[in-house]
Image (cartoon, rainbow, N blue to C red):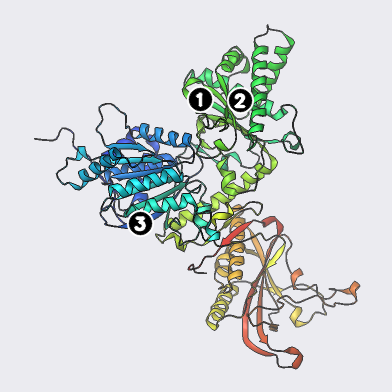
Amino acid sequence: MADPNPIIVEPAAQPPDGNWIPVVGPEGTEFLQTVAPAESRDGIRESAVAILSKGTPPGNAAGQETGLVVGYVQSGKTMSFETVAALARDNAFPMVVVVAGTSTNLLEQSTGRLRRDLRLDLPGRERRWVQLQNPGDDDATVQAIRDVLDDWRDPGTPEEFKKTVLITVLKNHRRLENLRDLLGAVNMQGSPALIIDDEADQASLNTEVAQGQESTTYRCLMEVRQQLPNHTYLQYTATPQAPLLISIIDSLSPNFVRVLEPGEQYVGGREFFAENSPYVEVIPAQEVPTNTNPLVEPPDTLLEALRVFMVGVTAGIRENGNIGNRSMLVHPSHRTAQHREFYNWVRDIFEEWKRVLNLADGDPDREDLLEDLREAHRELATTVANLPPFEDLVPSLRFAFRNTRILEVNAVGGRTPEVDWRSAYGWILVGGQAMDRGFTVEGLTVTYMPRGIGVGNADTVQQRARFFGYKRRYFGYCRVYLEQGTLTAFQSYVEHEEDIREQLSEFQDTGRPLNDWKRAFILDTAMRPCRQEVIEFDFMRDQYSDEWVAPRVVLSAPTVVQANRNAVTSFVQGLAFVDNEGHPNRTDIQRHQVCEDVPLRAVVEQLLVQMRITGITDSQRNTGLLLQLSKALDDDPEETCAVYRMSPTQRRQRGVDDNGEVTNLFQGEAPVSPRERRGEIYPGDRAVRDNDRVTIQIHTLDLTQGDEGRGNRRVVMENVPIIAVWVPARLARGWLDQRQPGQGQ
């Protein structure tokens, strides 16, 4: 007899360089059909299949894989790992563990969403999951999991009776120790598992690596992993700096990466922080609360932000009725005392405005408030095409105020309060750290953040961007108020984020282990990539601005020198050089040839990338140079430069020390004295440049060693090409480069 409810299994396309081919069965199919937006389903499905395929195959007896999944802030990372979890269920994984947040409210937020999206509580649905939150190793729990595992191991168990244990656990050492003990008691031998570490750069990493110790949470995670002979560990984050910079031999160092692409409705840093963005307002320095600038009354920009928000709430209610949410986030500081001060201001302002709106028509106070709100309406009208006329909104203002709640969000009372989004349309949330990471703010339109960047950790700054998200349809109502330093940090971070995502995306397509990826990326020198205590190996960082960049180690193996000769010869043969102008009394060594307006892209691809650099420090400096020039070409693909052949008719000699470092690459000024005539005939090599464009100097040297004072200086290598590059200030970019043992240069 035919099965009235056949199990649908959809074959997945062969994932490139995957370890196995997951199938898309009933759990994944139903999840995508009921939860994922129709226009995004194919992309979410393909991405989830690719992620799971890079893990350990479920049929293996043992094995571990660690992967990094990178999304934008508020970009759908949760939906991605829910899809991966559903596919794990389809592919005979009897256990999925979600390490969800460092606070109880975030754990419950994640657990609630998983239960809802995986339809665990849907009446009449087959029992495909057993969900446990912060489980212990009591007898009932141990026996329940053993029964689930035995069902999967027994070939006679009908498919509809096979369940997957879904564990959500707080990122807390006591809770993780309980989970370790539970896994040890049930014996996971032969049973594949999936671990999803949400916000994986937070708390999971070893913060005592520099002392040769293991921090408590990190140790507990390692012990949990040891109880799972066959598992895949997925690190989900929007800020991957720390997982990428930890030691590549660390168990939490990822060996594969997947970069998530958001749907078309996503609005992120590129939109908010575009040049001359109408969505960002600067909070003046005198309105930023500091120890030296205590505020005694609510700042004008806070009042402006509140008016803009409430006009938007009124328009939203008029458009949507009593459906959905609009919210405002006030993020003044990490100090709870300042939260209370801002909360009191907002509450008092609200009560006063509600009182004034109830005054009689024509009352001067009411007319003044309406004029202020009318100005906020004019501001919103610059970005909201279909904003109703202000006069049409006036009758709904009082109702909008009555349907907006004000809530202080911090853990002063021992636990961060939950937001009951269903109880009101409008919300104004005042808080700090509790809303930095993982905290979902429904319908966020206005953010007021007068706090600075603190110690300047790039990942921490970015995690405050709760204003990113899927809000294209109401983007015009969005405004972000920031102090200047934080605005600059966000603008810099956007460039850094796009650079690192682009590099990781290109690398994921190679199929090579992530350990091979060169840890080098654009990062403003005012920011640190992440907290220092999780990084074992140091990194170099710099930015070139109105300066020359050239290798110091120039005496290399003959094969390296010959490869560089070939690269230079191949490059210059396609250029038309002319003698550069200068004083007629210059010597042959001071006369050069120049080719103007050479495409910078050609120089980078055909010369600079081809040159082999042997010194470790030189290699890192060269990587930084290439990063800066790459960004210059991103900004202007038509960027040009000047190329000089230095002293092409008479080869120069330069001394090198025992380490192969050149003692002085650049020829000095002539004459040197008297002082008033210094450089009259020759300004020195460093002045041979275009001040506003990249300049390339090609030096060809005979290298010497020995004691010149005793007359035994000898040539140790001839015809050695050296490239020096001038980077003008307008192309300055901060960068970071880390080299670890075991990585190639």
Q: Earlier in the sequence, mark 2 or mark 1?
A: 2
Q: Quadrant of residue 670?
A: bottom right
How many neighbours does mark 2 have within 10 angstroms: few (below 14), some (14-19), or many (20 or more)? many
Which quarter of the rendered picture does the N terminus lie within? top left
The residue carrying mark 2 is 309
Q: Is residue 301 left or right of residue 434?
A: right
**Where residue 303 appears, x then y in whole percent?**
68, 25
Q: Secondary structure at mark 3?
A: strand
Give percent across and percent down for residue 322. 48, 18
Q: Which corner quadrant of the image does residue 680 belong to?
A: bottom right
Percent position of residue 706, x then y: 69, 89
Q: Residue furthest top?
A: 360
The residue carrying mark 3 is 64
* Structural crowding at the residue carrying mark 3, measured as other residues with C-alpha within 10 Å and reported as few (<14), some (14–19) or many (≥20): some
Q: Which residue occupies the foreground of this view, 530 or 277?
A: 530
Residue type at the position of mark 3: Gln
Marks 1 and 3 in Cβ contact (< 8 Å): no
Q: Is residue 330 left or right of residue 112?
A: right
Counting every numbered tag in the picture gives 3
Q: Which mark is residue 325?
A: 1
As shown in the figure, which amino acid type bears the numbered disc 2? Phe
Q: What's the residue at 61%, 41% (across, down)?
A: 273
Q: Residue at x 34, y 35 (%)?
A: 118
Q: CA distance from mark 1 to mark 3?
A: 43 Å
Secondary structure beneath label 1: loop
Mark 2 and mark 1: Cα distance apart in space: 12 Å
Counting residues from the N terminus, which is met first, the one under dot 2 or under dot 3?
Answer: 3
* Sequence-wise first label, 1 or 3: 3
